[in-house]
Amino acid sequence: MFQNTPVSFSGVQPSGNLTIGNYLGAIKNFASFSEQYKCFYCVVDEHAITVRQVPADLRRRTYETLALYMACGLDPEKNTLYVQSHVKEHAELAWLLNCFTGFGELSRMTQFKDKSQKHADNINAGLFTYPVLMAADILLYQTDVVPVGIDQKQHVELCRDIANRFNAIYPDTFTIPEPIMAKSGAKIMSLADPTKKMSKSDENTNAVVYILDDRDTIIRKFKRAVTDSDTCIRYAEGKDGINNLMTIYSVFTGKTIEDIEREFEGRGYGDFKMAVGEVCADALAPVQEKFKCFMSDKAQLEAQMKKGAEEAAYVARRTLSKVQKKLGFVQIR
Ligand code: ATP
Ligand code: LTN
């Protein structure tokens, strides 16, 4: 669709304050695709309402997520940045794809199982069909690569299955996308329970470092991070807490695990935790600075949203109309 330029697509939910998991596992990597790919990065507000949201918070976070995209280096001139609900084709294609997705397939999704446990009082149909809307997001843009954290790999694989199934009946409809995960940082763990993914909706705020946390808070959270009773800084099975801190240090500094083991030889956990806190705070400071600047001009953010939605809708409309024709819907335009 873009004269042989491959397409990158990803999305982040405005469902909470973004964490260093979202940053290291996803957003930080988005910018690296801008040169070689046509990039679409979406704020997926329709996905966010699969869990109850306070409207004023959802609205504010939608602006914030767009501002964070830009603060993390996504230039709106080189990337299409937009909000999912501004492009109606997402919800419309999702309905069509629902008719090509099995109940059994959706039942096997681990995110659905986890979220149904966490929100037992609100296991709604949207939570169940969440991956179908995500497939629509991706397939509308004839996407080649989807940069995501490991937790989303299963959803991208389901998207591939749906696309292959559709293409088998109606040939040459969709490009089959590939999930791309960071070599390191694709699964940042909770600081309070390092066997669990760090998640923006975690109730324990000490378990999570937010991109917008101030320096003192970041350092305090790392100091309190759960580790083990060993004393040396080494990456090993069963040392989930230390392994997680080493991964975070490694992604922020670019140093290898071996470099880090050497650097901290003979030093204790206290020193190491302090160092992780400092590199994290140093790396986030410029992002926070830019974020403040983008957030101070709402009109400019809205203009960006509008421009992004127009660019996205142009492509989305073409794919949706192709799908409708293939299905046998009458076209009256
Ligand atoms: P929620 O807690 O509301 O489910 P989340 O923190 O999992 O949200 P999403 O908006 O669902 O965040 O995810 C945005 C992107 O960040 C996805 O690509 C996801 O894989 C990635 N991501 C989320 N958490 C982590 C993590 N702990 N480590 C690495 N990547 C992550
Ligand atoms: N489900 C994703 C967010 C998301 C997404 C997408 C990611 C919605 N649509 C399309 C990649 C591509 C999540 O992170 N929870």
Image: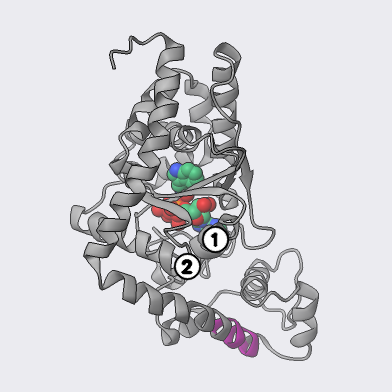
Checking the image for residue 31, the label placed there is 1
Q: Can the viewer see residue 291 in this picture?
A: yes
Queried on whether the Cβ of the residue with tag 1 lies below 8 angstroms from ligand 1, the answer reads no
Q: Looking at the picture, how far across and down is residue 96, in whole percent? A: 40, 21
Tag 1 near tag 2, CB within 8 Å: yes
Q: Residue at x 69, y 89 (%)?
A: 268
Look at the picture and state if 316 lies above or below 23. above
Q: CA distance from mark 1 to mark 2?
A: 8 Å
Q: Secondary structure at mark 1?
A: helix
At 43% across and 35% down in the image, what residue appears? 315
Q: Position of residue 56 (x, y in %)?
A: 19, 57
Q: At numbered mark 2, what does the secondary structure look like: helix, strand or loop?
A: loop
Whichever of callouts 1 and 2 sits on the residue coming sooner in the sequence is 1
Residue 72: which numbered mark, if any?
2
Q: Which residues are magenta?
A: 270-277
Disc assigned to residue 45: none
**Left or right, residue 118 beside residue 107:** left
- Amino acid under disc 2: Cys
Was residue 276 drawn as part of the magenta stretch in this picture? yes
Residue 36 magenta-drawn? no
> Residue 174's image quarter?
top right
Q: Is residue 326 left or right of residue 165?
A: left
Majority secondary structure in the magenta region: helix
Quadrant in the rendering for residue 234: bottom right
Provide residue 49's location: percent of width, then percent of height. Answer: 30, 44
Q: Is residue 260 left or right of residue 12?
A: right
Residue 167 position within the rendered picture, expressed as x and y whole percent measured from the top left: 58, 19
The residue sitting at 39% across, 27% down in the picture is 93
